[in-house]
Image (cartoon, rainbow, N blue to C red):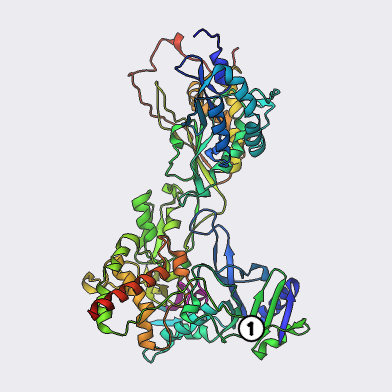
Amino acid sequence: MNQDINIKKLRINCFRQSKVPGQFMLQMRVPGGFIDSSYLTVIEHIARTWGDGNFHFGTRQTFDITGIPYENVPAVNAYLEDYIKEVDAKLCQVDMDTVSHEPQEWNPKSGYPTIGARNITACIGNYHCICGNCNTYELARKIEPIIFPSHYHIKINIAGCPNDCNKAHLCDFGIIGVARMVYHPERCIGCGACARTCEKASTRVLKLNEDTGKIEKDACCCIGCGECVRACPTSAWTREPTKYYRVILGGRTGRQTPRTGKMFLNWATEDVILSVLSNWQKFSAWVMDYKPEYLHGGHLIDRAGYKKFKEIILDGVTLNPQCLVAEDIFWDETEYRSNFNVKPLTMHQAAGPAE
Amino acid sequence: MDYVLNTAQAEEVLRALKKDYCIYAPKRFPKEGRFSDTDIIRYDSVENVSEIVWDTKSDYPAKEVINPIQETILYFTEDEFRESKGPKKPILILARPCDINAQHIQAKIFSGNGGYEDFYYQRVRELVKFAMMECNGGDDTCFCVSMGTNRTDDYSLALKFSEEGVKVHVTDESFQFYFEGMPDTSYTPMFVEENELKVKIPDLSDKDVRRALKKHPMWKEFDGRCTSCGSCTVACSTCTCFTTRDVVYGDNPEVGERRRVTASCQVEGFDQMAGQKEMRSTPADRMRFKVLHKFYDYKARFGDSHMCVGCGRCTHRCPEMISISATVNKMNHAVEEIKAGMEQ
């Protein structure tokens, strides 16, 4: 095999290098991991026509089509035009003629313009799930035009409830649907089902007061899962109609410093989530001196420091009155090599624009 | 007399009625359902006709108006007490025939049982008149026809709602006044004559059959399925069980109130006696008790009808998807099996 292929350019185009020389795997975006099943025929067509006939569920809920020879890439990209226009431009209202919020004309025959902002993953959420507190794919579709197309990297995972099946704790910006509960004491029969459920399945914040036959709540430790609502036989617990979200920041896997994310925002409304994310580009650009690198968002927070991140990311954001923000965050990384961060000063990464 | 009202006219009549009656009807409570972005339909006081949910069966029954989940019955101070005042204004409840028939059953239990009339039930019940909402057929959990509760003549008004407005049949002369000047029509209320779902109630008159049914393995299924949450009895149109609870105010045990709070035979501890003895200690035992109460005991005691009105709300509200009609059908099979065994 003797081919001259710019694999970095192909990677930005969402084609991943294969161990088989000259072959690539296409990663197609599916914002929120939810899409009309008719697109499965599109996948099949690409796989059979230009790939090796196989298909993999991407770990970030992309449609991954393996074994595409380099020479087939232009044909695949041309074929992707309809899919990208329907899914990103139409369904998610993405402006394809921008990159990182700057005008940049998209050639519809050229496939995906960037790989930086990764596919937004989501559990099925309240579209189906009895535990879900929010519609996860609708939220993903609202976020998609804010973060894509962009060369700045961000991994967003959306979980419909604090059970976090979709691992919001293991990505740059994890969003968890939470509910604020309303207690209607006049409908409460004091059966204690909510308190038992909260103890067994959640954070043990409810207690049946045997003297009054009513429920007492340790509201500050409530994680907003909604299990009490599900358990209640009388609708004495209901969810507030407004949807709220928790943001888990800076989680990641990786070779160097994997770590679980920590809570950044609690009880944020959708407007707050969207306006915070609209500052993501600005923050990333600032850290990297306006020169995007293949580096994920959590690392950028490490470089800048959480407080600088907070300053830029909350700039111009009007928080809803219920919203709480982490004053500081102390991540707990797995250090495969002890004192990983202790090194000569000259090896340290700088953050912010160059002088 | 019969009337046909458009939406504006219906609102006008409601406004006039509200001067003399508290009006209760099924109302939608958006996003208050068990699952996210699901609604609850339950009875509440209504201000406008547009609030009345007439095309979908309510999740909770009409009994909540007369026999609320929680009611303060008296207030006490040291050695004195006074009863709570209770409603004074007449009440008009918009209800389907199943819910109206259910009130006849509730009345038997509260006021036709043991030679004692329940004061707190009676004082509300006496203020109640029904506006019968013609049933559009309910849903796939309904089996009123099997239970004989599809018809009723206990109503002052019959109402047939549509997108355009409402047709009204007035049977109670005292209501004629509210419709003066409204366009008349000819309207005969219709009743559901057939449900998709049919339930056959087994004959349990033989004591040996009943004894064998109590021990039948069919009930064991519910140990694994039923969580004893009590959603079924709270949603039941006819269940009347309550507990009495004294709540003291602050740190002074001499001052407080006595409440009546709905109780459920399905919830653990319902039948706990001194010494912590429970008569029915498993979900299967509790389920069997409820089913036999609704489809045998009540009728054996009061004679005229079964306690279940076939509204299907218990099935609809069960978080474990236990269907009462499927359960009765299983009971039927068990009884056939028992009877066949006895004949051998």
Above/below status of B80 relative to A240? below
The answer to if B304 sits in the magenta stretch is no
Residue extending farthest top: A2
* Left or right: B203 as drawn, with respect to B132: left
Inspect the image, locate mark 1, and give the three-letter code of the amino acid beneath it. Leu
Residue B249 image offset from top left, x and y in percent: 41, 69
The answer to which image quadrant residue B291 occupies is: bottom left
Above/below status of A54 relative to B78? above
* Left or right: B168 as drawn, with respect to B105: right
Above/below status of A183 relative to A339? below
The answer to if B63 sits in the magenta stretch is yes
Q: Nearer the viewer, residue A350 or B81?
A: A350
Q: Nearer the viewer, residue A34 or B177?
A: A34
Q: Which residues are magenta?
A: B61-75
Residue A94 image offset from top left, x and y in percent: 66, 33
Residue at image x 43%, y 75%? B199
Q: Is residue A288 visible to us here?
A: no
Would you name the residue on which mark 1 appears?
Answer: B157
Residue extending farthest front: B344
Q: Nearer the viewer, residue A71 or A266?
A: A71
Q: Subunit of mark 1?
A: B
Residue at image x 28%, y 84%? B206
Residue B297 image offset from top left, x and y in percent: 34, 82
Residue extending farthest left: B275
Query: How many marks do you count on the picture?
Result: 1
The answer to which image quadrant residue B158 occupies is: bottom right
Quarter of the image containing the C terminus of chain A? Answer: top right
Q: Residues within 10 Å of mark 1 (few under 14, many from 20)?
A: many
Q: Is residue A88 visible to us here?
A: yes
